[in-house]
Image (cartoon, helix red, strand yellow):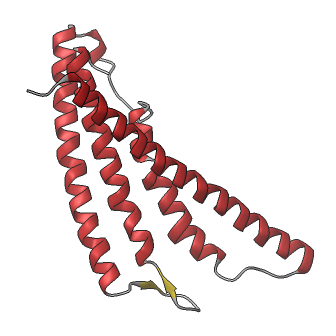
Amino acid sequence: MRRPEEGAAMQTLIRWTNLATMALASAFMILMMSHITADVALRFLFNGRLIGTLEIVSFYYMVVIVFLSLGYVELRGGHIRVDLFAKMMPQDVQIGLYVLACGVGLVFFGMLFWQSLHDALSATARAEEAMSNFTFYIWPARWALPLGFAGIWLAVLSNLLKSVTQRRAL
């Protein structure tokens, strides 16, 4: 049987891991805003443009921002929940439903992690690129998916452990 300190330490590690990925996603958001601002400024001030802005925003910034923030949002309880009827049920039923939902989430995000990891490895091995007027590699962005799915898997696990420990649905 695990000691309570181990569970708390694991939850702290999961929280810090997801905070780190959220910080990275935030840095990419700032980078994206700066990139787009520079492109717009060049268009209006000098009638020029930054080559590849659309591709970089679409294939890199947006992918990283969305997927790396998944775990943090789950830890904060920010994902959409439909619990209208569950809130009317007895506490034991609520806990059972929450544990079931977490179990399904662990299987689902585990499978997404596994497949996206396989896809990222494959894309990296073949140096995947997008069709463009220039050589534009997209394989590095493929790694945001397994990182994001690992983050949300860990967040669901943390929430499950917290729910079982506190004996209440989160």
Q: Position of residue 107 (x, y in %)?
A: 17, 46
Query: If the image is split into quadrants, where does the N terminus sit?
Result: top left
- Considering depth in this image, is 22 or 99 the residue closer to the camera? 22
Q: Position of residue 94 (x, y in %)?
A: 22, 16
- At 44% from the left and 41% from the top, the residue drawn is 72
Which image quarter: residue 39?
bottom right
- At 33% from the left and 19% from the top, the residue drawn is 84
- Considering depth in this image, is 27 or 50 the residue closer to the camera? 27
- Considering depth in this image, is 156 or 53 the residue closer to the camera? 156
Residue sitting farthest toward the left: 1
Which image quarter: residue 146?
bottom left
Q: How many marks?
A: 0
Above or below for 108 versus 54: above
- At 48% from the left and 54% from the top, the residue drawn is 66
Left/right placement of residue 136 relative to residue 29 reads left
- At 44% from the left and 53% from the top, the residue drawn is 68
